[in-house]
Image (cartoon, rainbow, N blue to C red):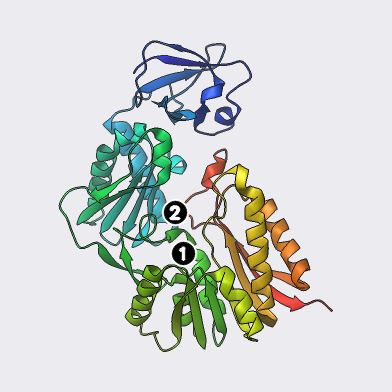
Amino acid sequence: MAGIVTLKKGEGRTLKSGGFWVYDNEIASIMGSIADGDITEVRDFDGYFLGRGYYNSHSKIRIRILTRTREEEIDDAFFERRVRAAWNYRKQIIDTGSCRVIFSEADGLPGIVVDKFSNVLVAESETLGIDRHKDTILRLLKQVLSEDGIAIRGVYERSDAKVRELEGLERHKGFLGDPFETKVEITENDVKYLVDVEEGQKTGFFLDQKINRQQVQRLANGKKVLDCFTHTGSFALNAGLGGAAQVLGVDASDVAVAQAAENAALNGLQDRVRFQCADVFDLLPQLEEAGERYDLVILDPPAFTKSRASVKNAVKGYREINIRGMKLLRDGGFLATCSCSHFMDPELFAKTIREAARGAHKRLRQVYFGTQAPDHPILFGAEESYYLKFYIFQVCEEK
């Protein structure tokens, strides 16, 4: 272990309340020589031990904590305990055919995400410190999975997010080991998908909406459905499998729309579920003007804000699409709407939806509220782990 970092008096509030991060402006002094990526000890101003984690001078998040136990060494045995605990947790709470196996801070491994798609792993490393241990973590994960009879046939790295640049790292993606076919077939909620782990968004598929998609599937029978920001068609296909009379999925990416159409054919739903490449913000007013009305409208946009500085503009975006979505509903129809940005906190998102309802002259009856699926656990004290808010409302005319 290299060096000791001491915090300023009164600092470290996030860390002391259960968080994992030490910011650059919280540090009073550094004793010894610490290179970027090294494991360092963190002490309070009075010398009290607070934890041990990895250091990076390029990041505003100077230290990410790995352990709060003074005696615990950061070695292979440490990583095996964390990996085994993460897998044992998933086995208890969700279908593990495809799931998020490691979720960064929420699994005590800050900076790394690993998704399992059938017998393929996709890893995303976001920080310098965890990059040093990435190969160890993946080796141990494959070992733990093999004990349950799961033979992983390949690992693909999707460390190509822009956030790596904030750590002084290059963006990277590619095979970790022998190459394999990167379009992987999975089944979720009885819906089949082809997941493109090489070219798809993030790790190739958004596993976090699994439980929320089930709610849409149960609600869709006999309905005319509009699925906005459909990506590769997951909500649209759940609606189709749930017995929807007709479904239109819309996305601005022609690549995503082509993949969604392929997924519809894979499920034999191409006659009732179709897709269109269009900008949702442009299309919704056109549909309204044309007199189109739906029984169920789904709004699953990308994060409109990735920083606190842009929250105000994000509120405007969420308000606009929710007003438009509500106006396209028949009286008594259903709106499924969500935000996937942790900067759009639950209270602000709920307030924005209420404002949209007033703007559309609609009354809302809450049917369901959900968050990300439990394989993306929300860790109290680590606010960044809570990001997805998902509502279903029945929408009625104001009378």
Residue 331 place in picture, x, y as percent: 72, 82
Question: Extreme right residue here?
Answer: 399
> In the rendered image of this protein, does residue 155 appear above or below residue 83?
below
Res. 379 in view? no
Three-letter code for the amino acid on which mark 2 is drawn: Asp
- Could you give the CA–CA distance between mark 1 and mark 2, rounded to whole angstroms? 10 Å
> In the rendered image of this protein, does residue 69 appear above or below residue 387?
above
Find numbered disc 1 in the image and state the secondary structure of the residue it sits on: helix
Res. 101 in view? yes
Which residue in the structure is indicated by mark 1? 210
Find numbered disc 2 in the image and state the secondary structure of the residue it sits on: loop
User: Which tag, 1 or 2, sits closer to the chain's start?
Assistant: 1
The residue that appears at 27% across and 65% down in the rendered structure is 184
Three-letter code for the amino acid on which mark 1 is drawn: Lys
The residue that appears at 40% across and 20% down in the rendered structure is 40
Camera-side residue of 122 and 373: 122
The residue that appears at 35% across and 27% down in the rendered structure is 37
Residue 351 place in picture, x, y as percent: 73, 57
Which residue in the structure is indicated by mark 2? 375
> In the rendered image of this protein, does residue 184 appear above or below residue 343?
below
Q: Pointers 1 and 2 in contact (CB under 8 A)?
A: yes
Q: Is residue 361 left or right of residue 178?
A: right
Q: Quadrant of the C terminus?
A: bottom right
